[in-house]
Image (cartoon, rainbow, N blue to C red):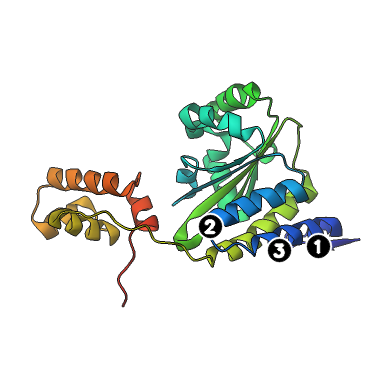
Amino acid sequence: MEAPTARGTRLPVVQYDRVFSVLERCDAARTIPEFKELLLESLASTFSYRNLTCFAGPTIKEAFADRSPSLRGSCVASWPGYRDRWHEIDVLSSDESCLLLSQEGLSDIDRLRTVPAWGREYIDGHMRQWGYRSSAIMHLQFPRGGHALVGLTDPEPHLIDDGAAAALRLLARHLSAISRRIPVEVPSLPVLSGRLQEVAALVGEGRSNREIAETLFLSLDTVKKYVSRVLAATGCRSRAEYVARVHVPPAR
């Protein structure tokens, strides 16, 4: 027996059963770290995917640089090299792939129309080194505008057939609905000096360096130094990450 998905693909009922099994387990999560662990465990047990990752970040592009992802299978061993050398040229970080992730919730190396030269370097380097012949990513929306990338890699070619792709797109939509409502513990800010506090507040409001300089009557170079110190003190890699993960807008 089969049923149609929103895209019109006939999805076997067994795939629906797998989707609902994963959703049921993940719905029990009370924190984002717990959600990530339950997600990888349920994908392994329900879909039999062995090599899994879950990266998170304030944007899809920045999620590829996550320094503390959840890992399963051979990805535990392959991740240090990926982190140090390959994440910036992951073939699934291409503009085409990121557009698919944003619009459809899934990108698969076998379904890309074009592979840039640097993406080919990634395939011939990192993937070949670890014997991976399949690579796909599922995109989820996380709380406070964050993003998660769930990676699936395997030595077998063509890991994601049309039925599995339809199931994963459906799963991504419903997982996002679950993850977005999980409460997020806001990290406590370190104690900052008076001027740094002022700069941090303006960065959190989305002000540019020039706007901050004009507001606080500082030189542009001084503002840049203060912003760098704010990011370093809060452990954020970018202004976007600071706004998404640390800054809490004042109540209105």
Where residue 148 sits: x, y (%)? 54, 51
Nearer to us: label 2 or label 1: 2
Where residue 225 sits: x, y (%)? 18, 43
Q: Nearer the viewer, residue 244 or 118?
A: 244
Q: Secondary structure at mark 1?
A: strand
Q: Amino acid at mark 3?
A: Glu
Where residue 144 sits: x, y (%)? 45, 62
Q: Secondary structure at mark 2?
A: helix
Q: CA distance from mark 1 to mark 3?
A: 21 Å
Q: Is residue 215 visible?
A: yes
Looking at the image, residue 227 sits to the left or right of residue 150; the answer is left
Q: CA distance from mark 2 to mark 3?
A: 16 Å
Which disc number belongs to residue 4? 1
Q: Which residue is mark 3?
A: 24
Up-down: is 121 above or below 46? above
Which disc number belongs to residue 32? 2
Lower sequence index among marks 2 and 3:
3
Find the residue positioned furthest to the right.
1
Circle 1 residues within 10 Å: few <14, some 14–19, many ≥20: few
Q: Secondary structure at mark 3?
A: helix
Lower sequence index among marks 1 and 3:
1
Q: Is residue 211 visible?
A: no
Q: Nearer the viewer, residue 167 or 178?
A: 178
Where residue 34 sits: x, y (%)? 57, 56
Q: Residue at the location (65% across, 53% down)?
A: 39
